Image (cartoon, grey):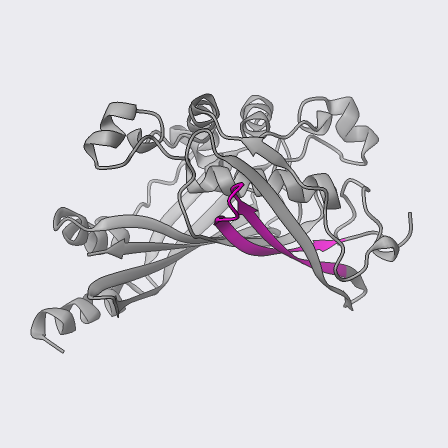
Amino acid sequence: MADGAAAQEELLKGVIGKSTGTSKVVIERGPVEHFASAVRSTSPIYHDPAAAAAAGFDAIPTPPTWPFVMEFSGKFAEMQSGDAPSPHPLSTVLGPLLSGGGLLLHGEQEFIYHRPIMVGDVLVGEGSIIDAYQKESKGKTMTFLVSEMNWKDEKTGEQVATVRNNLIVRA
Amino acid sequence: MRSMGEHKLSFDDVAVGDEAPVLTHKLTRTDLVKYAGASGDFNPMHHDEPAARAAGQPSVFGHGMFSMGLLGTALTDYVGIGNLTRFSVRFARQTWPDEVLSSKIVVTARREEGGRKLVDLAVTLANAEGEQKVVGEATAELPGAG
């Protein structure tokens, strides 16, 4: 293995286990409704509290991929703890690879649901990089970064969802 | 612990090999604009035609997560909202405006674990030519009898 590749392996190993920060998110009715429409759901449950109640829910639930987008509409700045790691461990790896012309791809995405996320929830999430490695494929170096975010109910502390994704940079 | 969930499908009514109703949708640029606005993903590749072409793409293309979202809709239409315990995909191919995308959801296992009645499903989203865009799996917890 060339020196450059060995150094890169070290850099990758070094970010495994690093925190990507915490996040507090409020789940609100309007954004959930628009997102449900955006993913082509026609269920009245996402729009009408009476329909949600008739289906047995205490509040309006959220679509399956909602955890991926919920920070966009619900991560209010004044609620955050301000402990974002600096530099962000993903940028220490991605920065040089992307500026070198690498292509960033979303490889895989996984959601594990411990209970449905509902409108009205306030969730706190903790993120970390759980794996980082590289592979040669067809003459190109592929760098894999696996991140995980664990979300809990702010009030009860119960686990709500685990979100895992795999980013790939193709050199 | 999991008490809630829309009751659409009962565990007793499911068999390995069952297929969910197919969700079919012709992708439009307006879909991508709506998805960008609702998700916060404003990567120009998905809404800015000149930018996508300048980057060497034939046109704008769909967010991978839009495809996963569409599959999520097909899944919950079948197993009911609030019943998924897991949903996982890999992104295989880009989607393009005017493609007709269809879901394929097949029950691969039916099992009981710790008192919970679970079904495992294989999920894919493909175009009319059969090219798979997104491939993955899901697990749902279902109520016993309808």
Residue A116: percent from left, percent from top: 66, 44
Report the front residue among B27 and A47. Answer: B27
Which quadrant of the structure image shows residue A137? bottom left
A89 lies above or below A14: above
Does residue A12 belong to the magenta stretch? Answer: no
Against A15, residue B23 (above or below) is above
The x, y position of residue A136, in whole percent, is: 24, 69
Please identify the residue farthest to the front as the structure is shown: B129
Residue range corresponding to the magenta coloring = B118-141
Task: Identify which residue is drawn at 77% across, 66% down.
Answer: B111
Q: Nearer the viewer, residue B89 or A53?
A: B89
Indicate the quadrant containing the N terminus of chain B: top left, top right, bottom left or bottom right: bottom right
B128 on left or right of A168 = right
The percent position of residue B121, horizontal first and vertical second, equals 66, 57
Question: A14 left or right of B108?
Answer: left
Residue B132 falls inside the magenta stretch: yes
Give residue B71's position: percent from left, percent from top: 58, 43
Q: Residue at x 81, y 65 (%)?
A: B115
Magenta: main secondary structure? strand
Q: Does residue A18 appear in this view?
A: yes
Residue at 27 percent of width and 52 percent of height: A90
Q: Can residue A64 be spotted in the picture?
A: no
